[in-house]
Image (cartoon, helix red, strand yellow):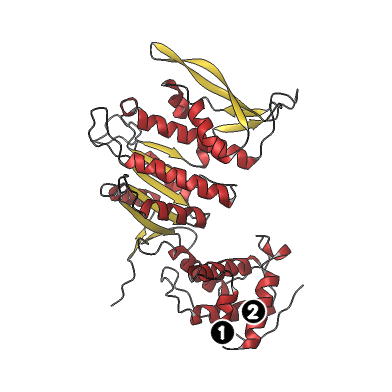
Amino acid sequence: MSNKPKINTYANLRTLARKLRDDLGGVELILLYAYNRTGKTRLSMEFKDAGKRKTKKNPGGIADTLYFNAYTEDLFTWDNDIENDTARGLKINQASRFFDGFKNEPLEPTIDEYLKRYADFDFDFTFQEVPLGNESFSRPVFVSFRKDDESHIKISRGEQNIFIWCVFMAICEQVLKYPGAYPAVKHVYIDDPISSLDDNNAIAVACDLAKLLRRAASRTDQNGAAAPMRIVFSSHHALFFNVMCNEIGRAKEGEPKVTHKRYFLHRPNGDGAYTLRATEDTPFFHHVASLSELQLAADPGTGKLYTFHFNALRSIMEKTASFFGHADISFCLKVLDNEEDRALYNRALNLLSHGKYAIHEPTEMGEDNKELFRRILEDFTTKFQFDLPDILAAAPVAAAPVSVSTP
């Protein structure tokens, strides 16, 4: 009898969002791994929208989800001040209630505390008084950046993203600190918070986020009663996802355990239905799933192989070698019986997964390189006996003896 985790299929994003909400009735956190263009951002918005639909339990249609995704980043728009070339910075969208978090107390110290962990620039908000009932509060309308003695500096897109992420983290801190001020917020949905970040910052952000989510899962209300926030986190970033799995899954002395589920989210045909596969015992499942993607691409009848597929295969081989405690892919090649093949494969993987071949553009491989790729893939998956997921129904890979060819 197969012991593979069950794969569940959902016809659309609404039914998938309902599944996640049902799961959160029994756990505090859901971790989703999915490739880019799967629909993660749209899923986060469907989840959010489901929380503000008028129902018997929510007759007023009051939103119950604090979320971070690409839409959150779009609340900040860079202005180069083309006319004067002096007041450069980020304009803040005033139509969003996202910035109501500033109404309880200044958020700058918390934002600065987070930002100092990842970047070396400072920031200054420009505020404007806005009405709130019979009172008013200062709401940010613009933020500029400085470093050393230079003000209104231009920062990179990655630096913008990490600043916006720090603002979100500070608002989350407010929700935890003042539960009475946010009685409707019951869920947090975080989708891909680390676009444009290097791996070092990705690890740091993941560790900080895991700490915050542990606190959110053990939140209490103003009377001290348990009021955990239910959280969904999704990412396409393999390193970030694995750090989150490790940090959340590891028991921490003096800290509450977070009950959670892990899923691989996939859209097999690029549109239509979605599938969820539980990966609680195998957080590296998505690498194995990537092999099935490569199997489909390598199918001589229906697949298409592009130059970047060599990069993808090399990455999986590196992770496999690391899993077994070895430094590089030579470990994966040593298991091959034929010494001539070992030399050929090593040369091909080194040559075809670097330089101009590493650019992720839809450049189709030449026929010789396609056959070589199929041979390497087949030998690798056969020797290591991967149990490939059936979500992709990958066809067998055809192979033929070839030599390396280069343009």
Rendering coords of residue 180 (x, y %): 30, 26
Across and down, in percent, residue 91 comes to: 60, 27
Is disc 1 in contact with disc 2, using a CB cutoff of under 8 Å?
A: yes
Q: Residue at x 41, y 46 (%)?
A: 210
Give the mark, 1 or 2, whose residue is nearer the N terminus.
1
Residue 138 in picture, x, y percent from top left: 49, 17
- Residue 335 lies left or right of residue 52; in this view the side is right
Tell which of 85 and 205 is nearer to you: 205
The CA span between labels 1 and 2 is 10 Å
Q: Give the farthest residue toward the top.
A: 134
Amino acid found under the numbered disc labelled 2 = Tyr
Count all numbered tags in the image, as a single digit: 2
42 relative to 305, above or below: above
Query: Quadrant where the C terminus lies?
Result: bottom right
- Reading the image, the residue beneath label 2 is 345
Asked if residue 74 shows in the view, the reply is no
Indicate whether 260 appears above or below 182: below
Residue 314: horizontal and vertical position, in percent? 60, 69
Q: Which residue is mark 1?
A: 336
Q: Residue furthest front?
A: 253
- Within 10 Å of disc 2 (Cα), the crowding (few <14, some 14-19, many 20+) is many
Q: Assign a secondary structure to mark 2.
A: helix
Q: Is residue 252 left or right of residue 236?
A: left
Q: Which quadrant does the N terminus fall into? A: bottom left
